[in-house]
């Protein structure tokens, strides 16, 4: 048994521990999937359609097969039934579900669809062979625009469906028409939430290898969801689930893009089994642009019914959501994840929600950081600014008049969610102070009066969002086919070291550090002695993985309970060893002692060794020391915050500059404030990028115009400022640790803050909206149109 | 095949390479130095950044034959085995300048080069200097802070 170390450092929760992960990441010892080089590996390359929509007439693979080093070329005929992805969320009873072939058989439906797969013994040979495959296509009309797609007679993405309408989902809450009749003003806007390409810095990558001694195949993938992926791979391929082990090694960012089952994963698995050799595939960045799912892409028709005195009565939301060509894991559900959040932090009597999912001949969409909630937040935070402007009210005043006050929690909002806690006043007060709100308003006034060509705008976003997907029954009611629980096992090993097995699957969020901090507090061992095991269905068999800011919100509950169960079992052993009644045993910082007799004590590490030898355990007690828990959350949690952006807009050139950004977030109790702040920074960058820089563009033939990193503008350090961040802490009451969630908040809040700021700057010119991204061109056009008397 | 002789992370390497072989592929696939990742195919992301004779270079944009006779430092050679970390590495950890870590090797080496050119950069100079290295996780805030912290540390250490 090793020497035990006593914890004397006090609470680990709340401490800005530097991260355990960093040592390997900073010295180049990281385990990316693409680093795996197994002997005898075969390399897979995919031939992608250059056309958005076409019939496949003929594929000639002979020249490719003749290339030295090429072993096989497969087309759809080789796998006529095999699906390459699947949808687990049929959101309505009459939804039209697509079949997503692993390799297209007779038709391609988006530029990037896979028509053939090469297997070669070398990566570059496989890539070279693609050029030698000859495909004859018969061009079919592309379906690019959602509104056009829904018109009668429009070309069809899936001819057998007879329509491009995938589904219509409705959620009427209250009687919107009745409240509208009472309104003095009905503010209407159409917002465009443009299509984005997630672009985690690590491209997707997969290695599948038969492991020899058994029928097991191990599949390493740069995925967020090893556990869910394993189930889906088994369902799609027919390979028994118990023969598949999925490992997500170090994963370089996900942002929803790796919350998916992709055809390359299916094909690598199937081909590794068929060929009996490791099969490897890594996407190029340009491939990522078409082959990895996209995010957002909604047209939002929004109405807000208000009274003259500035009271919100109700809201109407009518969405068109672009599915792309096929449904993937939660494609149709993604816009609906925002369904409950359209009322934001405001009280209202009615919310009438409709969403129409539309098929187009474009890359499928799915979750991207925030998934539905950024779109909802954009709509409500933009429309409240527009309503304030139409009523001639100061936008923060308008918000104050309508938001849920801190005395009113818990508050059941119009969509039926009960917000447990929040304090919008406190977060706003702090943000206003840090921002210098009044000074900036004064500067804005001065610039307006002097006719400065560079105008100043103040953008506000007072947001909330829902974290912690999700109570399983709620998911069931929404027709999602899986649960939302999370698992943790904590094992005290004979040497006193701790193995914390989590079902969450981090890809940059620092779970190894934060989970160690939680467990350290509960079981009283130093964080250095805790090893967090994750992302491997072999070592961590139960889990629902990482997305939707759920890892701490749900997984944290499982850690706490597992730790407490371990401590309780150890208490019985300690009592037995110390010859005392378990009720008389106190546990503090890893030490069990007899009440009133502190000399009689033992440590949790010593107990772990006793549990291992099992020489002297209480009668009937099973050896070994561990605690296990699978927690289904009671409810969601609702982080919130107030974000303020000072935007300078050059009215002559359309150039937009973000001068200052203040984010005050309330995510309840923070386990590691350094990690929380980092999550906020990264989210801000992505949300700001949507507002200012990014957007996937297609031409009328369905070709992606932003198909490489040279064309799709990801912001660099030179494109962003430093941020001012702070927090308020209003603990959640639905979570035993009082935590909420923070992974997506920055991305959810910042997009409307930026655009509200740009529009605020241009309001005197008659501008009421600016298309995203607020590029000089889009801003300039908005100014011109406003001055010509039109919208935008 | 062309013969090259290169010092990589302090070790002399001799190899016969295809003239079209990129430096990054030589490092990763032939030498097994997988600490240098690849993030794009258009020389935009900077994930693959290494030092060639002390200057930062995107290893996906040069051929292996072009570094013949030169000295290449990857993230794996910035620290000697079991040795002290470079001040930039330390500062990235201290300031939480990384999350997933995929951009990190390139970011660290680009920062080392930046500081060798400009030991006392302003925030603006740091931001401009790292323009060729993309990070999708951190929003750059803490990366900028880390570089400024390392700069202060290195100036303190040499003065
Ligand atoms: S891999 Fe992107 S610049 Fe080299
Ligand atoms: S830390 Fe993930 S890309 Fe920079």
Image (cartoon, coloured by chain):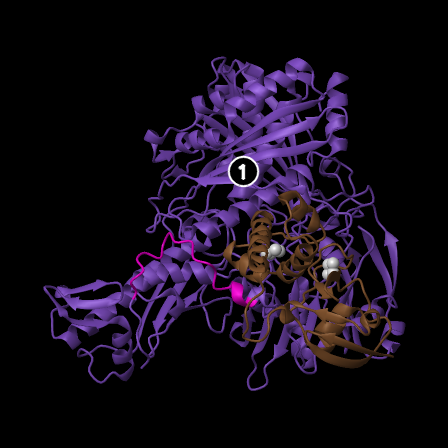
- Work out whether residue B45 can be spotted: yes
Nearest the viewer among A337 and B35 is B35
Say if A493 sits above or below A149 in the image. below
Residue found at x 43% / y 34%: A427
Say if A573 sits above or below A338 in the image. below
Provide the letter of the chain coloured brown: B
Say if A585 sits above or below A302 in the image. below
Ligand 2 within 8 angstroms of badge 1 C-beta: no
Residue found at x 32% / y 63%: A563
- Work out whether residue A82 can be spotted: no
x, y (%) of residue A405? 37, 28
The quadrant of the picture occupied by the N terminus of chain A is bottom left
Nearest the viewer among A744 and A672 is A672
The quadrant of the picture occupied by the C terminus of chain A is top right
- Image quadrant of ligand 1? bottom right
Assign a secondary structure to mark 1: helix
Instruction: Looking at this view, name the residue that lies furthest to the bottom.
Output: A213
Q: Mark 1 points at which residue?
A: A749
Q: Where does the magenta region start and end?
A: A7-24
Q: How crowded is mark 1: few (under 14 residues within 10 Å), some or many (20 or more)?
A: many
Q: Main secondary structure of the magenta part?
A: loop
x, y (%) of residue A687? 60, 41
In the rendered image, residue A8 lying in the magenta stretch gets the answer yes
Q: Quadrant of residue A39?
A: bottom right
Instruction: Looking at this view, name the residue that lies furthest to the front.
Output: B159
């Amino acid at each position: 048994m090793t020497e035990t170390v006593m914890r004397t450092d006090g609470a680990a929760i709340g401490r800005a521990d530097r991260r355990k992960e960093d040592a390997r990441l900073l010295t180049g010892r990281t385990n990316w999937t693409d680093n795996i080089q197994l002997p005898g590996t075969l390399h897979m390359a995919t031939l992608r359609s250059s056309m958005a929509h076409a019939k496949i007439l003929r594929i000639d693979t002979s020249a490719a097969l003749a290339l030295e080093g090429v072993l096989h070329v497969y087309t759809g005929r080789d796998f006529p039934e095999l699906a390459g992805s699947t949808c687990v969320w049929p959101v309505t009873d009459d939804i039209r579900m697509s079949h997503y072939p692993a390799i297209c058989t007779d038709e391609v439906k988006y530029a990037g669809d896979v028509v053939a797969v090469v297997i070669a013994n070398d990566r570059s040979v496989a890539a070279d062979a693609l050029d030698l495959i000859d495909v004859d296509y018969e061009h079919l009309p592309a379906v690019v625009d959602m509104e056009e797609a829904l018109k009668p007679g429009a070309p069809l993405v899936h001819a057998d469906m007879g329509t491009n309408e995938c589904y219509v989902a409705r959620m009427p809450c209250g009687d919107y028409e009745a409240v509208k009749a009472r309104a003095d003003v009905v503010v209407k806007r159409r917002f465009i939430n443009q299509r984005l390409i997630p672009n985690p810095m690590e491209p997707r990558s997969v290695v599948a290898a038969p492991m020899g001694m058994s029928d097991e195949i191990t599949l390493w993938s740069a995925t967020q969801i090893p556990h869910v992926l394993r189930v889906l791979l088994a369902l799609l391929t027919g390979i028994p689930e118990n023969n598949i082990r999925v490992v997500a090694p170090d994963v370089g960012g996900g942002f929803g893009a790796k919350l998916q089952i992709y055809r390359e994963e299916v094909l690598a698995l199937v081909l590794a089994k068929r060929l009996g050799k490791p099969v490897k595939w890594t996407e190029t960045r340009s491939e990522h642009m078409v082959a990895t799912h996209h995010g957002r892409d909604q047209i939002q028709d929004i109405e807000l019914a208000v009274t003259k005195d500035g009271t919100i009565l109700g809201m109407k939301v009518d969405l068109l959501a672009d599915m792309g060509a096929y449904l993937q894991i939660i494609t149709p559900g993604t816009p609906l994840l925002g369904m409950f959040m359209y009322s934001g932090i405001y009280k209202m009597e009615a919310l009438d929600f409709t969403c129409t999912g539309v098929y187009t001949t474009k890359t499928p969409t799915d979750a991207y950081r925030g998934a539905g909630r950024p779109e909802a937040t954009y709509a409500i935070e933009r429309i409240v600014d527009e309503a304030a402007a139409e009523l001639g009210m100061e936008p923060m005043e308008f918000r104050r008049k309508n938001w849920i006050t801190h005395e009113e929690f818990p508050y059941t909002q119009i969509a039926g969610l009960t917000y447990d806690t929040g304090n919008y006043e406190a977060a706003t007060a702090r943000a206003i102070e840090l921002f210098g709100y009044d000074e900036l308003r004064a500067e804005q006034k001065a610039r307006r009066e002097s006719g400065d060509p560079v105008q100043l705008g103040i953008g506000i976003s007072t947001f909330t969002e829902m974290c912690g997907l999700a109570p399983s029954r709620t998911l069931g009611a929404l027709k999602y086919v899986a649960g939302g629980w999370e698992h943790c096992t904590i094992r005290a090993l004979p040497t006193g070291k701790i193995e914390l097995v989590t079902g969450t699957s981090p890809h940059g969020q620092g779970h190894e550090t934060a989970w160690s901090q939680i467990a350290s507090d509960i079981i009283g061992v130093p964080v250095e002695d805790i090893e967090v095991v994750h992302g491997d269905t072999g070592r961590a068999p139960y889990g629902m993985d990482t997305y939707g800011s759920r890892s701490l919100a749900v997984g944290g509950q499982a850690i706490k309970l597992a730790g407490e169960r371990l401590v309780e079992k150890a208490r019985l052993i300690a009592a037995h060893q110390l010859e005392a009644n378990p009720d008389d045993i106190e546990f503090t910082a890893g030490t069990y002692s007899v009440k009133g007799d502190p000399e009689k004590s033992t440590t949790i590490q010593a107990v772990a060794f006793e549990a291992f030898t099992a020489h002297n355990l209480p009668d009937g007690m099973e050896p070994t020391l561990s605690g296990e828990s699978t927690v289904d959350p009671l409810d969601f949690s609702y982080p919130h915050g107030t974000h303020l952006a000072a935007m300078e807009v050059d009215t002559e050139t359309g150039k937009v500059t973000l001068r200052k950004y203040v984010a005050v977030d309330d995510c309840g109790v923070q386990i590691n404030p350094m990690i929380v702040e980092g999550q906020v920074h990264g989210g801000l960058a992505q949300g700001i990028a949507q507002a200012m820089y990014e957007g996937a563009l297609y031409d009328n033939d369905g070709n992606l115009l932003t198909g490489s990193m040279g064309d799709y503008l990801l912001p660099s350090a030179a494109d962003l400022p430093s941020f001012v961040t702070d927090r308020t802490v209003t603990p959640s009451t639905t979570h035993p640790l009082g935590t909420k969630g923070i992974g997506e908040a920055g991305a959810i809040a910042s997009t409307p803050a930026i655009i509200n700021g740009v529009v605020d700057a241009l309001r005197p010119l008659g501008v009421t909206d600016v298309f995203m991204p607020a590029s000089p061109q889009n801003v300039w056009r908005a100014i011109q149109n406003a001055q010509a008397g039109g919208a935008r | 095949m062309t013969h090259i002789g290169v010092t990589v992370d302090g070790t002399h390497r001799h190899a016969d390479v295809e003239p079209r072989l990129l430096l990054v592929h030589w490092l990763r696939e032939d030498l097994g130095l997988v600490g240098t990742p690849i993030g794009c195919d258009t020389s935009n992301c900077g994930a693959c950044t290494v030092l060639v004779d002390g200057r930062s270079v995107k290893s996906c944009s040069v051929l292996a034959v072009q570094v013949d006779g030169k000295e290449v430092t990857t993230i794996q050679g910035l620290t000697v085995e079991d040795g002290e970390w470079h001040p930039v590495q330390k500062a990235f950890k201290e300031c939480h300048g990384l999350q997933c870590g995929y951009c990190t090797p390139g970011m660290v080496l680009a920062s080392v080069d930046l500081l060798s050119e400009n030991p006392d950069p302003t925030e603006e100079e740091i931001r401009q200097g790292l323009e060729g290295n993309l990070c999708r996780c951190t929003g750059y805030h803490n990366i900028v802070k880390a570089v400024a912290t390392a700069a202060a540390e290195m100036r303190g250490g040499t003065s």
